[in-house]
């Protein structure tokens, strides 16, 4: 019977995801020859070829594809067991790096940090910001422990816990007559001087482009900016309304400067994400729980405008791991 080691599985999954021995070796911080030997040893133990080597890297064989999914599930379960053992300590400690979009960091980061300082004073939080596509890369590379991603995203790459859902809105000056309705239909956006936010490959613009295609509409945005903060400045300057979630303009909505009107049935979902197959510390698990608690409080008390909590019972990290093994 083959004798498999968790280290071999971890090495193989990293190579399988990176499709390249050199990049995998850099991520794992091991010498490339040692990595190649361990993967070859795993293939010998199983008696199958898992990877096909070529000039640009490697490709997974059919057997490799099957093992990759199973190995990631096994590694995640092993990580969960380690976390459970570590959680017996009375007080978590260590560093935890979190990744948020700039708007989520502005709305949520300070409140989470204050709650963390009260609950877990020995945990050192570091909050870094980037757009969702960049955060996905950082999670995969191990640069962040936990991140809040905008959906849709790939559940095969991450362990995802649904957090909340927000309607996509047209946000403009409060006295703009085009925002008089309680809800705006997608066709009404066609002739507006829109301000769009986020990178072209980001979830907000992907969602909007998909809606355009389905409705057979064509939008001609007046401006495209990377951050909601810049978009908000353009809206306040009278350039035109912005397509975003209401939370990015929380202060201006509360003081009555801006108004947000939902667009059709468009919604953005946000997920708590962590890497598959990577064991997290007790501190990471505690902060993940604290993030969920903090967001639930903000949704309940209305301090996350327009948000609706999502049911996470069937999608909790541990549930995902156990389901993948069944």
Image: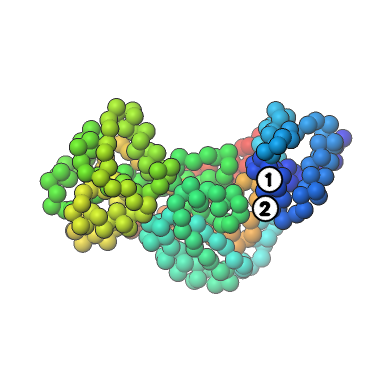
Residue at x 49% of width, y 71% of height? 118
Question: Which structural element holds mark 2?
Answer: helix
Q: Nearer the viewer, residue 7 or 120?
A: 7
Residue at x 80% of width, y 30% of height? 48
- Relative to 218, is 41 above or below? below
Q: CA distance from mark 2 to mark 1?
A: 8 Å
Q: Residue furthest front?
A: 55
- Please provide percent x and percent y for residue 304: 34, 55
| Quadrant (top left, top right, bottom left, bottom right) of the N terminus | top right
Residue at x 29% of width, y 53% of height? 231
- Please provide percent x and percent y for residue 137: 55, 49
Residue corresponding to mark 2: 27
Question: Does residue 28 appear left or right of residue 208 in this picture?
Answer: right
- Please provide percent x and percent y for residue 184: 22, 39
Category of crowding for the residue at label 2, using alpha-carbon neighbours closer than 10 angstroms: few (below 14), some (14–19), many (at least 20): some
Question: Does residue 3 appear left or right of residue 105 in this picture?
Answer: right
CB-based contact (under 8 Å), mark 2 and mark 1: yes
């Amino acid at each position: 019977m083959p004798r498999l080691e968790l280290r071999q599985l971890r090495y193989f999954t990293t190579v399988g995801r990176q499709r390249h021995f050199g990049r995998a070796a850099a991520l794992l911080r091991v010498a490339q020859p040692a990595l190649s030997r361990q993967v070859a040893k795993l293939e010998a133990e199983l008696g199958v070829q898992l990877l096909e080597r070529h000039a640009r890297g490697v490709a997974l064989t059919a057997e490799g594809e099957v093992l990759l999914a199973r190995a990631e599930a096994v590694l995640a379960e092993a990580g969960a067991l380690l976390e459970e053992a570590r959680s017996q300590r009375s007080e978590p400690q260590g560093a935890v790096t979190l990744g948020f979009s700039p708007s989520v960091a502005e709305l949520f980061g300070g409140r989470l940090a204050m709650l963390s300082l009260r609950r877990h004073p020995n945990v050192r939080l570091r909050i870094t910001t980037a757009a969702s596509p960049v955060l996905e890369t950082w999670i995969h590379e191990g640069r962040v422990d936990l991140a809040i991603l905008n959906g849709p995203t790939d559940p095969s790459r991450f362990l995802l816990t649904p957090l909340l859902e927000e309607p996509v809105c047209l946000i403009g000056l409060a006295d703009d007559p085009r925002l008089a309705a309680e809800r705006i239909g997608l066709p009404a956006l066609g002739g507006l001087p829109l301000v769009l936010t986020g990178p072209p490959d980001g979830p907000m613009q992907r969602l909007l482009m998909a809606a355009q295609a389905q409705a057979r509409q064509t939008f001609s945005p007046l401006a495209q900016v990377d951050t909601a903060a810049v978009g908000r400045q353009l809206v306040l300057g009278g350039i035109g309304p912005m397509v975003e979630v209401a939370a990015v303009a929380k202060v201006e909505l509360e003081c009555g400067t801006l108004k947000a009107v939902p667009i059709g049935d468009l919604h953005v979902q946000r997920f708590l994400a962590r890497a598959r197959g990577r064991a997290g510390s007790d501190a990471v698990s505690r902060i993940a729980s604290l993030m969920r608690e903090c967001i639930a409080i903000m949704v309940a008390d209305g301090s996350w405008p327009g948000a609706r909590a999502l049911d996470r019972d069937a999608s909790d990290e541990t549930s995902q791991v156990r389901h993948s093994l069944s």
